[in-house]
DNA sequence: AACAACATCAACCGCGCGGGC
DNA sequence: TGCCCGCGCGGTTGATGTTGT
């Protein structure tokens, strides 16, 4: 049996207080990121390392872009999801200032429903004849509220999670291989465009940071997917 | 105004991967 | 070569906010 990541008896859980945030920020400013396991003690925090890491990455990091997703960001997420599936960290790596958690939440709460309302299966990004056809309004209160959370999520539930599956990239990506007639329905422009010219510098900086990792991941992806991606 | 239902998102959990020994 | 440990990822949960009745 695997050891827990920390001694749960002595750690706080739940929402972070301002003081905790400040301690974490101060510590990372002074010592940099890394060694999350020992960080809490060193920083004087009663949190487990994973919790500190998550808090920093998803909320406290100075380069985070908070706020609503722009339309081009939405497009990019949808396109990348079609290619990569639920590989949120890879998708987030292409969105400067966004975290995997943020992208994942946004997908689950907004984009998935948007696709469903457009009659597109968010699993494989193909037109779904069983779903309602496109409506004039993308997300209307009545149309979405009639879809219970369970109903909306059910088709997207993956079978028992397995990282091994990732080697096949994803449901979405693998479906591209399975059925090549899927994408044209979406009219997806698969060229990856940068979100905006103003954020170009940030994009480049972050891309450098993630480039090697992304490239490694893409090497594992099926060649057809790589071609599309490039 | 009060309650219920739904939506959002921060945070947690468990697992797999990869590096070090 | 195999084991251990730390990190990172994706799925899920639960608290909180918002909207509808």
Image (cartoon, coloured by chain):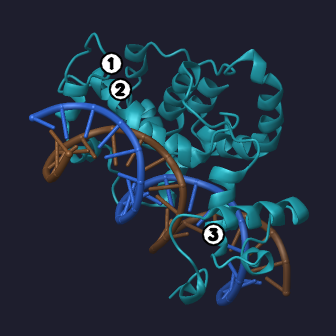
Chain colours: A cyan, B brown, C blue
Q: Residue A32 occupies which quadrant of the picture?
A: bottom right
What subunit carries mark 2? Answer: A
Choose the circle earlier in sequence order: 1 or 3: 3
Q: Are marks 3 and 2 in contact (CB under 8 Å)?
A: no
- Count the numbered circles shown: 3
Horizontal arrangement in the rendering, residue A215 relative to residue A103 (left or right) = right
- How far apart marks 2 and 1 lie (CA) works out to 6 Å
What subunit carries mark 1? Answer: A
What subunit carries mark 3? Answer: A
Same-chain status of marks 3 and 2: yes
Q: Are marks 1 and 3 in contact (CB under 8 Å)?
A: no
Q: Which residue is mark 1?
A: A138
Mark carried by residue A114: 2
Q: Does the image show residue A206?
A: yes
Q: Give the secondary structure at mark 2.
A: helix
Callout 2 crowding tier (Cα within 10 Å): few <14, some 14–19, many ≥20: many
Residue A114, given in percent of the width and then of the height, sits at 35, 26
Q: Which residue is mark 3?
A: A50
Residue sitting nearer the eye, A204 or A60: A60
Residue sitting nearer the eye, A223 or A67: A67
Choose the circle earlier in sequence order: 3 or 2: 3
Q: Residue A97 occupies which quadrant of the picture?
A: top right
- How far apart marks 3 and 2 lie (CA) works out to 32 Å
Query: Could you tell me which quadrant the C terminus of chain A lies in?
Result: top right
Choose the circle earlier in sequence order: 2 or 1: 2
Residue A129, given in percent of the width and then of the height, sits at 20, 22
Same-chain status of marks 2 and 1: yes
**Going 65% across and 61% down the picture, which residue do you hit?**
A18
- Image position of A37 with respect to A91: above or below: below
């Amino acid at each position: 049996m695997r050891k827990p990541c920390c001694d749960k008896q002595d750690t706080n859980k739940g929402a972070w207080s301002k003081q905790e945030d400040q301690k974490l920020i101060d510590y990372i400013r002074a010592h940099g990121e890394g060694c999350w396991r020992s960080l809490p003690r060193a920083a004087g925090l009663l949190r487990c390392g994973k919790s500190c890491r998550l808090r920093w990455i998803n909320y406290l990091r100075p380069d985070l872009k908070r706020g609503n997703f722009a339309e081009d960001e939405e497009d990019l997420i949808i396109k990348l999801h079609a290619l990569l599936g639920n590989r949120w960290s890879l998708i987030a790596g292409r969105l400067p200032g966004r975290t995997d958690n943020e992208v994942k939440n946004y997908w689950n709460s907004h984009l998935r429903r948007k696709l469903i309302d457009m009659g597109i299966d968010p699993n494989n990004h193909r037109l779904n004849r069983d779903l309602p056809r496109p409506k004039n309004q993308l997300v209307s209160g009545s149309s979405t509220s009639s879809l219970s959370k369970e109903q909306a999520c059910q088709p997207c539930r993956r079978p028992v999670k397995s990282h091994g599956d990732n080697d096949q990239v994803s449901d979405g990506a693998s479906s591209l291989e399975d059925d090549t007639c899927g994408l044209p329905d979406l009219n997806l422009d698969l060229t990856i465009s940068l979100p905006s010219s103003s954020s170009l510098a940030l994009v480049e900086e972050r891309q450098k940071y993630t480039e090697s990792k992304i490239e490694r991941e893409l090497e594992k992806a099926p060649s057809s997917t790589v071609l599309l991606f490039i």
